[in-house]
Amino acid sequence: MTACPCGRLDARQRVLDYAACCGRYLDAFDATPAPDAESLMRSRYTAFVRERADYLLATWHAAHRPAQLDFDAGTRWLGLQVKDRRQVDTEHAEVEFVARQRDASGRAHRLHERSRFVREGGRWYYLDGTQR
């Protein structure tokens, strides 16, 4: 078993296996899209951990999608905490989270963001976020 980087817990409060959690979305994006905004946000965190630019770009809304993504060498992701989730309506949602990382020099960083998501054509996409 490989613990999923997103840290989602099962009913017994154990971290879910990657394949049963975010792996099913990252490894089969076309066949298995994330069913809700929180699952998409968690899978995007896992994609950052695994440096999966293809998945990140594919799940970024076209209105705000960068042309490419570069990863900082030596970055180590330390954990994710979902602080809040809110379904605005059937096509819009928000997820507030804190993601922790350590850069190549050993300096710790914390990203606290309220992300906005939109559903189009049955798929959720990351739209943008406001840092807290």
Image (spheres, rainbow, N blue to C red):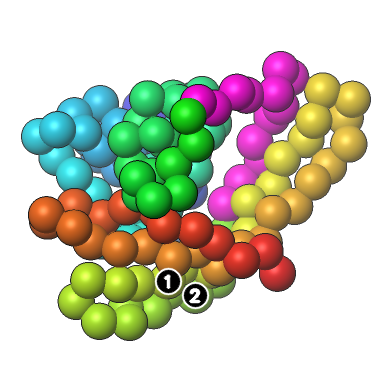
Specify whether 73 is left or right of 79.
Answer: right
Q: Nearer the viewer, mark 1 or mark 2?
A: 1
Which secondary structure type mostly characterizes the magenta part of the structure? loop
The C terminus lies in quadrant: bottom right
- Residue 71 part of the magenta-drawn span: yes
* Residue at mark 2: 84
Kind of element beneath mark 2 = strand
* Residue at mark 1: 94
Marks 1 & 2, CB-CB < 8 Å contact: yes
Disc 1 to disc 2, C-alpha distance: 8 Å
Residue situated in front as seen by the camera: 69 or 11: 69
The amino acid beneath tag 1 is Glu
Compared to 96, does 25 lie above or below?
above
Magenta stretch? 68-80
Quarter location, residue 85: bottom left
Kind of element beneath mark 1 = strand
